[in-house]
Image: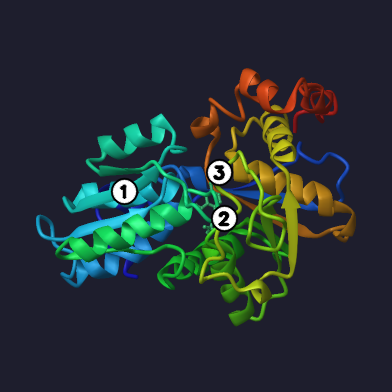
Amino acid sequence: MAKQALKGVLSTIGNTPLVELVHLFPDFPARVFAKLERFNPGGSIKDRSALSMLMERIHSGELVPGRSVVIESSSGNLAIGIAQICGYYGIDFVCVVDAKTTEQNVAILRAFGASIELVTERDAETGEYLPARLRRVAELVASTPNAYCPNQYANPLNPLAHEGTMREIVEALDGPVDYLFSAASTFGTALGASRFVRRSGLSTRIVAVDAVGSLLFGTVPGQRLIPGHGASIRPALLDPSAADDVVHVTDLECVVACRTLTIREAILGGGSSGATVAALGKMRDAIPEGSNVVMIFPDGGDRYLDTIYSDSWVNRHFGEVSHLWKENSSTKVAPC
Ligand SMILES: Cc1ncc(COP(=O)(O)O)c(C=O)c1O
C-alpha cells in the first residue's frame, strides 16, 4: 500500500515504538522488547488491519462517501479502527456489536459517526454472541445496496498488514529477533508476522498466545472474561503451521501479568498484552540465554479500567488475589 498517499491522522498509523523492558523479568538472561501498538491513532494494532482492508477500495473508488456502506462485526479495536477511517473519508459504517461490548467502545464508535447494530441474542448452538453477530452482518450485507464487509476473519489484507508490523520490528532491532510473542484471535497478526519471517529467511520463532477456553488451538471451549486474544470460532485465516509454539493463558494469569507490567514497567497494557507477558513467563525456561524476545502489545489498558484494572471486578471474579502482583513489586530492579 502506498503509505505516502495517506493524509491527516491516518498517516500516523504504524511505525509504533519498540521499547526494551528491563524491569519486567529481572533475572532473565535474554533481552525483552515490546512493540507498543497503542500508539496507533485509534489506540490499537487493529488500525493497521482496518487500513489494509479499506484503503485499496477507497483509492480505487469502489468505496464512495454517501453511497457505500461498510458493515463489520467487531465490538472493539477493529471497529474503532474502521470507524476512524470511515469517519475521515465520510463513508457510512454500520458496526454490529453485542451486549458484551463496553459502553466506552460504543461511545467511541458513535463519536466517530458509526451506526450501531446491537445483537441481543446469543447463538443457540454455541451460546456465544459471535456467530449470531456474523449472521446479522450477512443479513445486512445482503439487504444493503453498495455494502462492503471487510471480514477480518478471512480477509488476506488483514495478515498482509502485519507483514509490515514484523518488518518494522526487524528493522528496529539491532540484532536478530529470536522469538516473537503474538496474541491471536483472527490470527491476522501472527500469520502476517510468520509470512514475513519465512519469506525473509529469518529464524524467528513465532509464539501464538491463545486464551484457555478459546477454540483456536484446541482447548475445550469455555467462558473467557477478557476480550482480545482467543476466539469462539475457527477463523479462515487460522493456519496452525504458521506458529512454532502455542501458549495458553488463563484470565487470572492475564490479569496478574497486566498488573505486574504496570508496576514494573509503568506500561498500562491491554488484556492481550498481559497475556503475552504471562506466556513469556511460562516459556522463559525454554528460551536460550542471550536471545532477543519481542512481544507485541496490541492495545493499552485504558479500555480495561472497569475490568482488569478494577479491584472490585477482579475481586468479584477471582477473589482476593492482589498479593499475586504486589509480591512482584518488591523485586523491581534499580533504575537504569
Ligand atoms: C487487544 C487485541 N489483542 C489481540 C488481538 C488479536 O489479533 P489478531 O486478530 O490479529 O489475531 C486483537 C484482535 O482484535 C485485539 O483487539
Mark 1, mark 2: which one is toward the viewer?
Answer: 2
The structure residue drawn at horizontal position 61% and vertical position 38%, both measured from the top left corner, is 225
In the image: residue 315, left or right of residue 167: right
Residue 6 visible in rendering: no
- How far apart, in angstroms, are the residues tagged by discs 2 and 3? 11 Å
Dot 2: within a 10 Å radius of its alpha carbon, few (fewer than 14), some, or many (20 or more) residues? Answer: many
Label 3: state its secondary structure. loop
Residue shown at 14%/64% (left/top)? Answer: 145
Task: Give 131 or 334, whichever is nearer the viewer.
Answer: 131
Element under disc 1:
strand
Which residue in the protein does label 1 denote?
95
- Going from N to C along the chain, the mark reached first, 3 or 1, is 1
The answer to whether residue 160 is above or below residue 333 is: below
Residue 288 drawn at (x, y percent): 87, 61
Drawn side of residue 250 relative to residue 102, left or right: right
Task: Please rate how many residues cluster around mark 1, counting C-alpha atoms within 10 Å: few if below 14, some from 14 to 19, many from 20.
Answer: many
Q: Which of marks 2 and 3 is nearer the N terminus?
A: 3
Q: In which quarter of the image is the C terminus?
A: top right
* Above-or-below relation of 93 to 22: below
Q: Which residue was labeled with disc 3? A: 227
- Number of the label disc, if any, that sits on residue 232: 2
The reply, left or right, for residue 73 in relation to residue 273 is left
Q: Position of residue 171 (x, y in %)?
A: 57, 64
Provide the secondary structure element on which disc 2 rests: loop
Q: Which residue is drawn at 88% across and 42% down?
A: 27
User: In the rendered image of this protein, does residue 151 appear above or below residue 16?
Assistant: below
Q: Compute the Cα span from label 3 to label 1.
A: 17 Å
Amino acid type indicated by mark 2:
Ser
User: Three-letter amino acid code at disc 1?
Assistant: Cys
**Residue found at the very far front of the displayed protein:** 124
